[in-house]
Amino acid sequence: MKRRTLLAGATVLAATPLARPHAQKPVTIRWWYHFDDPKMSPAGLVEQFEKQNPGIKVQAENIPWGGGADYDTRLYTSIIAGIAPDAAMVKFNNLPRLMEMDALAPLDKQIDAWPGRSDISEDLWKLHRAPDGKRYYLPVQFVVLYLYARQDWFAQKNLKLPATFADFEGAAQALTGGERWGFGLRGGAGGHDHWCSFVLGGGARLEKGGLVSPEALAANRWFIGLYTQKHLFPPSAPNDGFQQVIGNMKAGRTAMTIHHIGSANEMTAALGDAITAVPVPRGPQGRGWTTFGDGSNAILAQGSNQEAAWKWISFLSTGEANVAFNKLSGQVTVTTSGAQHWAFQPQRFMDATTASLPIAATLPPTPQTADFTRTVWPQTTQKALLGQITPDDMMRVFEKHFFG
Amino acid sequence: MKVEGRALPWLLLAPALAATVLLVLAPVMETLWLSLHDVILYRPRSRPFVGLANYLALLDDPAFWESLGNSVIWVIAAVSLQFLLGLGAALLLNRQFAWRGIARALVIVPWALPSVIIGLVWTWMLDFNLGILNQVGVRLGLLDAPVAWLARPDTAMAAVILAVVWQGFPFFTVTLLAGLQGIPREHYEAAAIDGAGRFASFRHVTLPGLAPVIATALLLRMIWVANSLDLILVMTGGGPGTATQTLPLYAFLRAWSGANYGYGSALAVVLTLMLLSVVVTYAVRSARERSA
C-alpha cells in the first residue's frame, strides 16, 4: 500500500511543471518607448533586467514621436489591430482615449504590493490616478516647465528675474530691441504650454464657461497683445516650433522662453552661466500655472504577458534603474532616492523644477485634449497672433472645443 | 489551345492585378466604406452608419473650402513654375557645353532627396533669425529687415511653393530633355532653311515635338503635387493659422491627429474624385498614344 502511494505520488510529481525545470519557455514582452534624443538606447537597461529575470526577454521598440500624434495614433491602431505591445510609454493626454478603448490593465493591485511604491512621492501618485479612481499608469519620468532667462542681460539692465506677469512684461520690454526680443513664444504645435502659463495662470479655467469668463478673456487679450501690440516676441513666433525657440535662445535672439530641464544641458553648453531658470511668473491674483510634463508606463489589457510586463515597467521605475532611464530620456527621476544624488544637469535647473511643482498641473484628461494641443490650439492661436481673429474669438473657439 | 491563348495574358497579368487589388483597390473601398460611417479611432466599438452625413458636413465646413482654395493655388503655382523652370533647364542641358554630363547629373539631386529633408533644409534657410535667405537679403540690401517667411500668411504659401518648385523641377527637366532628344535634327534644319529664327524654331518645332511629353508630365505632376502633403507638414504644419493647409493635409490632420477617420476619409474621397478627372484624362491620353 505504502509503495503504491509512493509510486502514484511520483507519477503525479513527474507530470507537474515543477518536475521539468526546462519546460517553461522564456517570455518575450514588447515595450514601446520614445526618447527626445533618438540616439539614446535602453539596451543597457534591458540587459540588466534580463540578467535579473532570466525567464523574460524585452523587445524594446522605439516609436517615432511626431509631436505625440504619431506615437498615439500608432498605439491606437495597434490596439484596434490586436497587435498592441505588452507595455508602452504613455502620457496623461491619451489616458481618456485609452480608457474609452478599454485598452489598459489596472495596476492598483500590483502598485499596492510593490516595494518601490514608497520611493515615489504621494503627490505623483495623486496625479497619476485616472478619472475612474483606478491607476493605469506607473510614473517613470517627469518634467515641470519653467522660465529660462538670460541672467547676464537682466543684470546689465538691473532687472530682477520675473516672479509676476508685471515683472515679466517689464523685463520683456526692457530687453526687446534691435534683433533681440523679450520672449521666445512657441506658436507652433506644442506651444500651448506657453499659453497655459499665462492665460490659465492669469485667470482662465478649464471648466464650462471658464475660458470665456471676463478674467480669462482679459488674460488672453494681454498675452496676445504682447505680440500684436507690444512686439515683444520675434515676428516668427506664430510658426516657431521647439527647435526655433531653443535655437533663438541659444543664438542670443531672445531673453526668455519656457521649456524644461530636458534642454538644460544644451542651453548651458551654448550659453554657460549666462542662462538660468526660474518658475514661470504668476498672474495678478497670485495664481500660477505651469505644465507638469508626465511620463509613465502602462500595461496593455490585450497582452498575455502582463505579469512579465509589470516586472519590466516596475524595474524601470525603481531606484537606480529609474535614474539611468532618465539619463536617457533627459527628464527627471520619479524616485525620492534617485533625486538625492541627481547630477545630470546643473543644480539651478533642478531647483527651478522643484520650485515650480506647487503650480504644476496638467490639462484635463478629456478626449478633446489631444486634438486641442495638436491642431486646435496652434491653428487658432496663430490666427489671433496674425490678427485674423480677435483674442476673444480665439477663446470662444477653445470653449466650444472643450465644452460644446 | 484557344482557351490557353486567351488565358495566357490574364495569367501573366495576375500577379500585378492581384497586387493592385490588394494594395490599391481594397484600401480605396475601405476608405469609401469608412467615409459612410462615424469612425472615431478611440471608439472602436461604436461605428454607426451615417450615410452621406460626413459629405454633407464638409459642405458646411469653412476649413474644407479654405483648404480646397489653398490646394488650387498650391497645384497651379507649383506645377506651372516647376514646368517653366524644368523646360528652361532642359533646353539649356540639351545644348553642348563643357561639363554637361555633370550638370545633368546634378540637376537630379533635388528630385532624389526625401521630402522631409527638403522641408527641413528650406525651413532653416527661410528661418527668421538664423536663415541664410534673410542674412544674405539684409546684407545685400535686398531686404530692409529679416522677414518671417513661414509665419506670415502673405508669404507662407509662396515659401512652401518655392520649396516644392525646387524639389519638383528636375522631373520636368529630365522628362523634357528626353523629349527634346527625340525631336529629329532634320526638323530644325528644315526650319532654318525656311528662315525660322530661334524663337520660331522653338515655337514651331520644339513645342509641337514636345507636346505629348509635356501633356503627360503635367498630368502626372498635377496628381503628385495635389496629393503631396509632406513638405507642407514639415515646413508649416498648415499654418500660420490655416494659410497653407491644403486638402490632403486637412484630411490627414482630421484622420491622423484628430482620430476622426470617418470625416478624414470623406475628405480623401472628395479629393480622389477631383483628381479622378485628371487621372481619366491621363488614362485616355495614354490609351490614345498607344493605339497611335
Image (cartoon, rainbow, N blue to C red):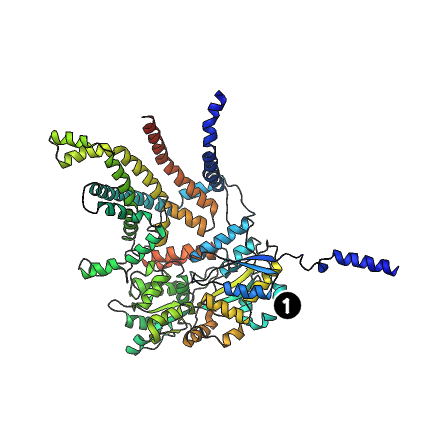
The chain carrying label 1 is A
Q: Is residue A166 positioned above or below B247 on the image? A: below
Residue of label 1: A113
Given residues B172 and B10, the one toward you in this image is: B10
Q: Quadrant of the N terminus of chain A?
A: bottom right
Residue lying furthest right: A1
| Residue drawn at 50 percent across, 46 percent down | B39
Q: Amino acid at mark 1?
A: Ala
Q: Name the element at disc 1.
A: helix
Question: Relative to B275, is A223 above or below?
Answer: below
Height in image: A61 above or below A171? above
Q: Locate residue A216, reporting x and y percent.
A: 41, 64
Query: Left or right: A132 with respect to A179?
Result: right
Q: Is residue B290 visible from the viewing direction of this image? A: yes
Residue at left offset 36%, top offset 53%: B234
Write down the quadrant of residue B213 in the picture: top left
Q: Position of residue A362 (x, y in %)?
A: 48, 64
Of residues A298 and B202, the one nearer the viewer is B202
